């Protein structure tokens, strides 16, 4: 039994909520009465409610995000139906804005808007003392990061062994890109570096080797970035007696046009398979960038991506957004082709979403932006992209993930894309959907055959060369039983035992 439960629905089991662990670590005198329970969106809300109520809590704090908003609404409705006396407190970005319009907020007892790290504990103290606040909506004041108890001790050993572990060296973002909630931040604030590095050292001693930094702008303050990189470089140089530990793997989000020489020199010292950079390019149309208040030097962006690809071992994951105000298909296609030439290992193609509170909504009337009224609030059409075309682009993005970003078609992809990557892959995408009527849940052996047929029929590629590259890819990903359409192709000289490799390594 626990007086207070902290809970959320993660997108998948491998994700471990950093936000809930901040709340737990900062519960103060109530820490001993507080329990953390995590679920996933794949679990039935009624089963989640059963587990929550079995603990007989007085207060339940629920983290609500764009990916779990639907399921959380059902959880809250069930909780208030079954146990209306249990106090339900909501927090998270999804309910921090426009809360008066949301049914889930009307059903809950309290909503904390903003960073709830210490505000949740303060609310619980009021409730348990019998002095509840007068209003249901609580605006959390800005948090002084140096006063927070860091959350990393709240990760269990099982979390370190089996789940993605998130860490953050700073919060906020100084940029004002209107599609992002960080546009509301005044600036980026760093955590005190020395205690943060001590926490990283403790996680490392406990066996953690995969660190995912959630900082929006890891390379904003180069001095701090270098100290963090040097922290990990020092551990690469020390031999370890525990052969069971996985190799070190670090994920950072980078500003694309800011890569000074000192940072380049440190990046070059990391071996293959260690660094992954998520690089938010979003659009290469300067007029669109200005319209959404995004400051980006496209020439430096191109230079930096090419340098990272040619001169470092980092795995590069670059982001583009479909549907930004005023950007039609032709402009997006040009940007996609430009970005492909810069050489990232992956291009993440995303559809614009209307995050609650983000300033992008101010362009709705001028550009006829029509968003799905249900989560994840994806863009349905604009004045330059009609609904049917947006559907085609959505399928393009999903097929791109299956074929290009998966790394499974490494040898074949250059043949598929040729000199016009967007146009050719769109042709293949249209063919795949016309043939299958589906854009997910395609078994991998069948996907290989579909790519072969689509490349021959839609792209007019020569069958023999295509069979050779597809056989190379088929064997490289470790599939058994060569399918009939590849049996006549000469077997490649070597195979990579990629069953045990990470997705990033399949791009090398």
Image: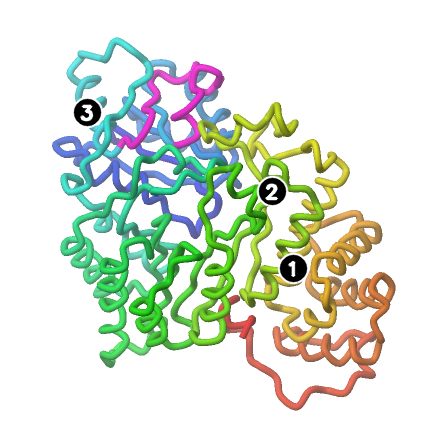
| Percent x, y of residue 97 | 41, 24
Q: CA distance from mark 3 to mark 1?
A: 51 Å
The residue under the point 22% across, 67% down is 231
Numbered badge on residue 128: none
> Image point 23% across, 58% down: which residue?
224
Asked if the residues shown at circle 3 and circle 1 are in contact, with their CB atoms under 8 angstroms apart, the answer is no
**Residue 86 visible in image:** no
SS class, disc 2: strand
Per the rendered image, the range of residues in magenta is 93-116
Cβ atoms at labels 2 and 3 below 8 Å apart = no
Q: Residue furthest left?
A: 29
Q: Is residue 116 above or below residue 456?
A: above
Which residue is farthest bottom?
493
Name the foreground residue: 459 vs 359. 359
Say which label, 3 or 1, has the lower sequence index. 3
Q: Earlier in the sequence, mark 2 or mark 1?
A: 1
Q: Which residue is mark 1?
A: 337
Q: Residues within 10 Å of mark 2 (few under 14, many from 20)?
A: some
Labels 2, 1: front one: 1
Q: Position of residue 319 (x, y in %)?
A: 53, 53
- Number of marks in picture: 3
Q: Secondary structure at mark 1?
A: helix
Query: What residue sits right under mark 3 in the picture?
Result: 122
Q: Which residue is mark 2?
A: 351
For residue 400, above or below residue 209: above
Cα separation between marks 2 and 3: 38 Å
Q: Nearer the viewer, residue 466 or 50?
A: 466
Residue 73 located within the stretch drawn in magenta: no
Q: How is the image coloured?
A: rainbow
């Amino acid at each position: 039994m626990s007086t207070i439960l902290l809970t959320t629905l993660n997108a998948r089991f491998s994700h471990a909520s950093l936000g809930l662990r901040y709340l737990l670590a900062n519960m103060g005198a109530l820490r001993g009465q507080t329990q953390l329970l995590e679920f996933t969106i794949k679990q039935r809300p009624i089963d989640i409610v059963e587990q929550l109520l079995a603990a007989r809590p007085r207060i339940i704090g629920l983290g609500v995000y764009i990916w779990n908003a639907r399921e959380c609404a059902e959880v809250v409705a069930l909780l208030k139906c079954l146990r209306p006396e249990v106090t339900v407190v909501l927090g998270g970005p999804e309910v921090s804005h426009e809360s008066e319009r949301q049914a889930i907020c009307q059903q809950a007892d309290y909503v904390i808007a903003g960073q709830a790290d210490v505000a949740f504990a303060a609310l619980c103290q009021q409730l348990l003392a019998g002095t509840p606040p007068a209003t249901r909506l609580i605006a959390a004041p800005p948090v002084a990061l140096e006063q927070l108890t860091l959350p990393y001790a709240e990760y269990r050993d099982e979390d370190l062994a089996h789940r993605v572990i998130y860490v953050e060296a700073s919060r906020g973002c100084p940029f004002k890109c209107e599609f992002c909630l960080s546009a509301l931040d005044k600036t980026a604030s760093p955590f005190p570096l020395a205690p943060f590095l001590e926490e990283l050292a403790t996680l490392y001693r406990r066996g953690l080797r995969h660190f995912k930094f959630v900082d929006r702008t890891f390379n904003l303050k180069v001095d701090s970035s270098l100290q963090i990189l040097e922290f990990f470089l020092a551990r690469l140089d020390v031999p370890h007696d525990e052969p069971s530990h996985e190799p070190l793997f670090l994920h950072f989000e980078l500003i694309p046009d800011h890569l000074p020489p000192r940072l380049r020199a440190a990046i070059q010292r990391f071996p293959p398979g260690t660094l992954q950079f998520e690089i938010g390019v979003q659009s290469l149309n300067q007029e669109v960038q200005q319209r959404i208040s995004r400051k980006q030097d496209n020439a430096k962006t191109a230079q930096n991506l090419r340098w990272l690809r040619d001169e470092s071992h980092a795995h590069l994951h670059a982001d583009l957004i479909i549907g930004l105000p005023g950007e039609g298909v032709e402009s997006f296609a040009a940007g996609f082709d430009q970005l492909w030439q810069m050489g990232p290992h992956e291009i993440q193609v995303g559809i614009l979403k209307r995050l609650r509170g983000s300033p992008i909504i101010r362009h709705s009337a001028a550009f006829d932006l029509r968003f799905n009224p249900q989560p994840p609030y994806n863009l349905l059409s604009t004045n330059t992209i009609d609904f049917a075309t947006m559907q085609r682009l959505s399928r393009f993005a999903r097929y791109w993930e299956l074929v290009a970003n998966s790394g499974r078609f490494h040898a074949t992809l250059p043949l598929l894309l040729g000199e016009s990557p967007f146009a050719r892959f769109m042709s293949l995408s249209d063919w795949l959907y016309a043939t299958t009527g589906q854009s997910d849940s395609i078994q991998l052996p069948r996907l290989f055959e579909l790519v072969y047929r689509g490349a021959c029929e839609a792209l007019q590629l020569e069958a023999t060369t295509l069979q050779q590259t597809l056989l190379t890819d088929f064997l490289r990903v470790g599939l058994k039983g060569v399918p009939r359409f590849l049996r006549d192709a000469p077997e490649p000289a070597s195979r990579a035992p990629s069953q045990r490799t990470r997705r990033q390594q399949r791009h090398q």
